[in-house]
Image (cartoon, grey):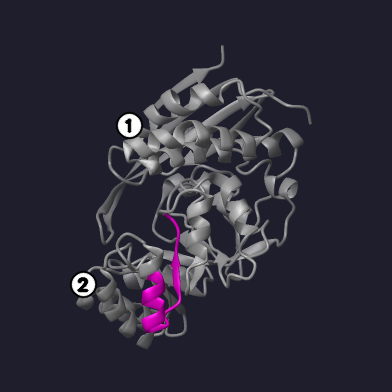
């Protein structure tokens, strides 16, 4: 395939109201939003996604960062060389993020372009991106995410209906609430495996204290237990308690991710494909996991495109563990893509549609879209 120049970049913001707010230890999710990015080149369109769950004004910021910061650099570049473009964008905008004190928004915007380019490569070659990358497995085990502190019985039962063998509980809401969440999961599904996510709710001392009782309750690993996610704190927590740890969704760039996965006690690396550097950075990370005792289990808690990209990633790298599957209602995941996310015996099957995404439901996109804008190469 010869090079194709990026001709046009389109950004779309989609929204869907929530009947019930989703509590987190640091905030709550009041509206489902997704940020779609189209990259046009060679007569085809690749589709990516940028993470905009928080804050409520993230979509406004992302439009500016993508269209005013990223697009002028990306337009006119080779669409078939995602790695070179990502490195170019990071070199051009990394200093801006440092001075701004906002590495996250820069990386999240760049990640959406990277995802779109990998989708585009598959589409232009007439096959799934998994096939172009080289499949390692045809499915990956999924765990139920988003369980607690509300609707614990209902969501655990939903996990069982889907054939899932593990749930990840949301904790960090105080000892009484957290214990009630774990107990409710055990009541609804006595034999299910339990993981826990504190979303950086605790100090190191608090994390040590909580890890002790969580281990007693059979929690297998603890995600983002310490505020700031400092590798030294994580290593100290594991040294004192022996609790296996997980994290990475708020870590940006390969160097920082490698530092995290070589931290003592970290067993689940959870970078986010729409935050941490797209497929390009996460595949580079996967190449360095051998001998670390850590597997790649991508974080995902948003829309359809990023979930498809995460599944493709996990089925095309050697050291993979789990896929995160949010079991709360999310039409921006369930209604946008043809074919959905088929499961077999608790495993999510590798996507087979063209590119990463396949066909989007145009009616659903129009129904949920609240804003669109674009830039063209001239």
- Quadrant the N terminus occupies: top right
Q: Residue at x 54, y 45 (%)?
A: 278
* Magenta stretch, residue numbers: 234-249
Q: Is residue 154 in sight in this rendering?
A: yes
Say left or right for 155 vs 206: right
Residue 147 falls within the magenta-colored stretch? no
Element type where label 2 sits in the image: loop
Point out residue 38 in the picture as x, y percentages from the top left corner. 54, 30
Q: Quadrant of residue 139?
A: bottom right
Q: Is residue 223 in sight in this rendering?
A: no
Residue at mark 1 to residue at mark 2: CA–CA distance: 33 Å
Residue 39 sits above or below residue 313 on the image: above
- Quadrant the C terminus occupies: top right
Say left or right for 34 vs 205: right
Q: Residue at x 65, y 35 (%)?
A: 120
User: Which residue matches tag 2?
Assistant: 174
Element type where label 1 sits in the image: helix
Point out residue 55 in the picture as x, y percentages from the top left corner. 29, 44
Q: Residue at x 43, y 27 (%)?
A: 69
Q: Are marks 1 and 2 in contact (CB under 8 Å)?
A: no
Residue 353 sits above or below residue 75 on the image: below
- Considering every residue shown, the one lying at the far top of the view is 378
Point out residue 313 in the picture as x, y percentages from the top left corner. 61, 54
User: Which residue matches tag 1?
Assistant: 60
């Amino acid at each position: 395939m010869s090079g194709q120049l990026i001709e046009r970049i389109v950004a779309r913001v989609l929204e869907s109201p929530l009947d019930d707010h989703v509590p987190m230890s640091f905030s709550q999710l009041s509206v489902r939003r997704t940020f779609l990015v189209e990259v046009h080149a060679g007569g085809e369109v690749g589709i990516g996604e940028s993470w905009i769950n928080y804050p409520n004004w993230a979509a406004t910021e992302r439009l500016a960062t993508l269209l005013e910061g990223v697009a002028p650099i990306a337009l006119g570049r080779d669409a078939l060389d995602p790695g070179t473009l990502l490195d170019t964008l990071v070199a051009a905008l990394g200093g801006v993020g440092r001075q701004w004190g906002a590495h996250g928004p820069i990386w999240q915007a760049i990640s959406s372009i990277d995802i779109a380019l990998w989708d585009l490569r598959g589409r232009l070659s007439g096959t799934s991106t998994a096939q172009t990358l080289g499949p390692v497995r045809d499915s990956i085990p999924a765990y139920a995410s988003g369980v607690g502190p509300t609707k614990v019985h209902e969501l655990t039962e939903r996990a069982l209906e889907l054939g899932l063998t593990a749930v990840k509980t949301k904790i960090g809401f105080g000892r009484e609430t957290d214990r009630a969440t774990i107990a409710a999961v055990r009541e609804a599904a006595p034999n299910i495996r339990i993981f826990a996510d504190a979303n950086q709710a605790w100090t190191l001392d608090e994390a040590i204290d909580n890890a002790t009782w969580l281990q007693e309750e059979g929690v297998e690993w603890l995600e983002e237990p310490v505020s700031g996610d400092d590798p030294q704190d994580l290593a100290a927590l594991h040294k004192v308690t022996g609790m296996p740890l997980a994290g990475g969704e708020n870590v940006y760039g390969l160097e920082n991710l490698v530092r995290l996965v070589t931290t003592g006690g970290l067993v689940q690396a959870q970078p986010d494909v729409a935050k941490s550097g797209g497929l390009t950075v996460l595949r580079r990370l996967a190449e360095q996991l051998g001998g670390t005792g850590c597997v790649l289990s991508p974080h995902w808690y948003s829309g359809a495109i990023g979930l498809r990209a995460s599944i493709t990633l996990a089925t095309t790298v050697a050291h993979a563990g789990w896929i995160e599957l949010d079991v709360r209602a999310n039409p921006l995941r369930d209604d946008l893509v043809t074919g959905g996310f088929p499961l077999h015996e608790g495993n999510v099957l590798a996507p087979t549609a063209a590119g990463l995404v396949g066909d989007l439901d145009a009616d659903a996109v129009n129904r949920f879209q609240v804003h669109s804008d674009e830039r063209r190469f001239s």
